[in-house]
Amino acid sequence: MFRRLLAVTTAFVLGTFSVASAAEPIKIGAILSATGPASFLGEPQRNTLLMLQDQINEQGGLLGRPLEVIIYDDETEVNRAVAAANRLLSRDRVVAAIGATTSGNTLAIMPRFSSARIPLVSMAAAERIVKPINPWVFKTPQSDRHAVLRILGHAQALGFTDIAILTVSDGFGQAGREVLQELLPEFGMNLVADEIYGPRDTDMTPQLTKIRGLSPDAIIVWGTNPGPAVIARNRVQLGMQTPMYMSHGVASKRFIELAGEAAEGLILPAGRLAVADQLPEDHPQKELLLEYIQAYETRFNAEVSTFGGYAFDALKLIVEAITKAGEATPQAIRDNLQQISGFIGTGGIFEMSPEDHNGLDEKAFVMVRITDGDWELLVE
Amino acid sequence: MDLGTFLQFLAAGLTVGSTYGLAALGFTIIFNTTGIINFAQGEFVMLGGLLAVVFMHWLDPGLPAAVVLAVLATTIVGLVMERLTIRPVQHTSVINLIIVTIGVSITIRGLMMLLWGKDTYVLPAFSGTTPIPILGATIAPQSFWILGITLLVLAAMRYFFSRTIFGRAMLACSFEPKAARLMGISVERMVMASFMLSAFVGAVGGAILTPLTMTSYDVGVLLGLKGFAACILGGLGNPFGAAAGGLLLGVLEAFGAGLISSAYKDAIAFVVILAILLWRPSGLFGAPDTERV
């Protein structure tokens, strides 16, 4: 009698459990800098993730289960990012995670995800995130190296040889500076000036005056807003005519607004998002980019940015891996992520492999010139 | 180094140094009447610039009116700050009051972030951006505005403190509050006035620099720090020494970045300040301490 009762109870409990688990959400974590100095990167990323979550759930979710994106704001602080990583791993038990927004924070949280064997897709640029390869870590933005290759290729075509660089003294600038120092000699160019500015500096005329005295063929500026806008203004203020390249770190409309007329004629590498409407009709990314821009701008009433695109790609790649695997376990997601090929994202067409966890090359960038306060796509 | 390059560095240094100087002046005005280091001083500089942007956007009254409105509004913020946060706890120790000012600075920063967002903003230049060539250097018209207005404010303050009865009453409070009170001066009113004045000069600095250097809710931290360093350099008790210290700090930074290495720009300024503290602890223009035990 007792045995039968136990069996019935067990069956009942198991039955309800399996019903519950069918509707249990697939949890994906996200750590991003929605506030703090990198908020201009993190905010569009958070918006994008919320938007995608709603879109996917409206279309019936993933594998018949709802998708739940658990977002933590690291306030652009390393300690907060690490705490968030711990929470995602121990309390929320996510099957995959997206983050962090900045390179420094990504490098800090990476070891936790790889030792917990949970795949992590970063939205930060630094090449060190995927080189050397970490079996559990991926990233969606193009690397600094790709941007430098594009800029130097453009400069080479114009016959420039003497190059001055002006980089910001934070992680983004340091990474760019290292790649520039490495690749300039390979392009047969001379580094005539190697100047640095602080991320909060408000006047870079001393550095530019020094550079002007060395009369280089071109200046490459590496930084994110607002520094490069100050530099663009200082350049005009000093009456300098030297051609100036900017990094992909300022490829947003905000930069043109800040630099004003001083932005005219500057050249920079940018993801295709900035010039989506100028792409040829048959470009594989065009439709996706226009759809994303339309959806984002209608929902948030704000200008779309490439940085939000990194989050778009990160979540879409994970979703693609889950769909392909037919199950949402960390191991299956990881295995399928590194098999993704020909995947069209906002940043480029991803060709992942066990040896390449970024999946992009320099073709993910196009060169654009700022003309009449807007981006002008330069013919490749 | 040729004359043009020298002038270029000098102009860059004096331009940025002007804001450090005005922030430093604000520090000393409050320090003199109360003995408080007002850590919200950098926020006054930020409010001067950012509120001008806000007024331009909301009311569109034209640039000069927006700047005047921003400076007036910041002066009122100084008044409100003294009334709401300093006066209720005025009998506590100075260190507690300093902590109160830190709290106020965080609050102001947070409010501006919520109200106006985290982006960077810029004001149009007062008279165009066509650079003016002078002896081989090219200087932005805004630099002349900045230097001119800074000198004007300094002259006005000088006149106020040495020639007007109100200004002299404030000085009296700074030297000996008890005696000043016995002479019938309302020390409370003077403290309130000192907060308004320091908010005023800080805001002027912020508003005139914004067309050149842009602003956002968090620029006050660094500007406050540099203003404080300028005070140390020039002498904390001496308003005009502090302002001169600001100009000197700006020039040091510019020449440091241009001649030695831009990577150590901030370090150079702080090393010089350390050296001065060792050599003349009261600052370049401060009177040596003659307190007897």
Image: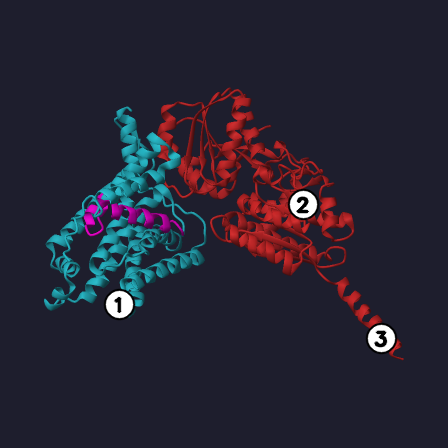
**Residue plotted at (45% across, 52% down):** B118
The colour applied to the residues of chain A in this rendering is red
Question: What type is the residue that disc 3 sits on?
Answer: Leu
Q: Earlier in the sequence, mark 2 or mark 3?
A: 3
Left or right: B125 with respect to A282? left
Question: What type is the residue that disc 2 sits on?
Answer: Trp
Separation (CA) of disc 1 from disc 3 = 73 Å
Image position of A21 with respect to A220: above or below: below
* Residue A266 visible, this orientation: yes
Which region shows up in magenta?
B218-244
Mark 3 lies on a secondary structure that is helix
Q: Check residue B131 in the rendering and tell me which mark sits there, or answer none.
A: none
* Residue A238 visible, this orientation: no
Image position of A224 with respect to B180: above or below: above
Asked whether the residues under marks 1 and 3 belong to the same chain, the reply is no
In the picture, which quadrant includes the C terminus of chain A? top right
Q: Chain of mark 1?
A: B
Separation (CA) of disc 2 from disc 3 = 43 Å
In the picture, which quadrant includes the N terminus of chain A? bottom right
Mark 2 neighbour class, 10 Å CA radius: few under 14, some 14 to 19, many 20 or more = many
From the image, tell me which residue sits under label 1.
B90
From the image, tell me which residue sits under label 3.
A6
From the image, tell me which residue sits under label 2.
A136
